[in-house]
Amino acid sequence: MINIAELEKKFNSLNKFNLVFASFFFSLMTLCVKNVDERIPIYELVLFRSLLSLMITLFIIKIKNINPLGNNKPLLILRGILGTSALICIFYAIRNMPLSISTVIQYTYPIFISIFACIFINEKITRNIVFALIIGWLGILIILNPDQLSNINVEIGKVSVSIAFLGSICTALAYVTVKKLVFTEDIYVIIEYFPLVSLITLLPIVLINWVTPNWNELIWIIGIGLFTQLGQTFLTIGLKNLSASEASTINYLQVLFGSIWGVLFFSEMININFLLGASLVLLGTIISTTKIIKRT
């Protein structure tokens, strides 16, 4: 029998590394999304991802003998709605942009997360966190500079950019919601509501517009569900031990992972400006993790 409690204890002892693992697995999820043929609709990918994630989570909940309904149902449902909206926007951006660029735009969410955390859960933003966020944000701006995009022969539509930023906002709100929920809910109940809400809201749309995936597409779709589940698990555990602002700066690492996959698998161009921006993003992450090490 799988000892879930023992696994959770080990995960909690990892501290900041939970969020590093989350970033890595989420980056693998984006790699899988990018590899699925465009004939498969975005909402169908989200549904498949949700179905696999829900099955895994309910299995763990049954082993732990947890009440799957949770305590704060309205907030849990809101987390599911925000997560679903963010995922649809993120999948759209991944499909319609270079992987490195879509990941960069997604990671504007730490700016929003700091604002929302201050408004909704009364978190104080320390000088170190502000410094880390400014450095990381500067790196993102360098990468998204129009001249920089022209140099690497990339054209991005305004609709794609807008949807990508909407995904970033929804991601930030979902982070803050999770941070509030971890004080009253088991992490697996929080994770459960995300795919549950996705499944309920998207199933009618998918059934009406069903496209049958082939075996190759199915492998990538299973990868989406598996890596997203792993990412969500490490993310939720990580948020339980860190402030939302601290967690967001560590998760900047997904920008680096996404850029690596873009170069290796999709022949995306990386120039000196992109490297400069990515280095600033990494510097912001180092500042954040150094602070956490001192605190612990």
Image (cartoon, rainbow, N blue to C red):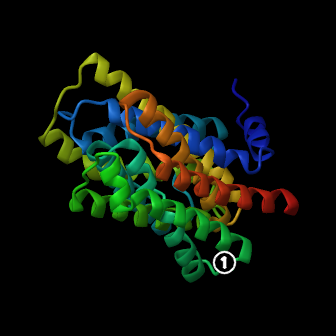
Left or right, 155 with reference to 197: left
> Tag 1: residue type?
Glu
Compared to 99, does 125 lie above or below? Answer: below
The single residue placed furthest to the left in the displayed view is 208
* Quadrant of the rendering where the N terminus is positioned: top right
What secondary structure is found at the residue carrying circle 1? loop
Residue at the spot of label 1: 123
Residue at point 73%, 31% (across, down)? 3
Q: Quadrant of residue 296?
A: bottom right
Residue in view at x 65 percent, y 45 percent: 20
| 160 or 217: nearer the viewer | 160
Q: Is residue 239 above or below residue 111?
A: above
Q: Position of residue 24 (x, y in %)?
A: 57, 39
Q: Crowding at label 1, few (<14), some or many (≥20) Cα neighbours within 10 Å? A: some
Q: Quadrant of residue 18?
A: top right
Viewer-side residue, 198 vs 292: 292
Q: Nearer the viewer, residue 191 or 42?
A: 42
Residue at the image position 49 percent from the left and 71 percent from the top: 112
205 horizontally vs 225: left or right: left
Q: Is residue 234 left or right of residue 33?
A: right
Residue occupying the point 62% across, 60% down? 249
Q: Is residue 207 positioned above or below 138 on the image?
A: above
Residue 231 in picture, x, y percent from top left: 55, 42
Q: Position of residue 142 (x, y in %)?
A: 46, 61
- The reply to whether residue 296 is in sight is no
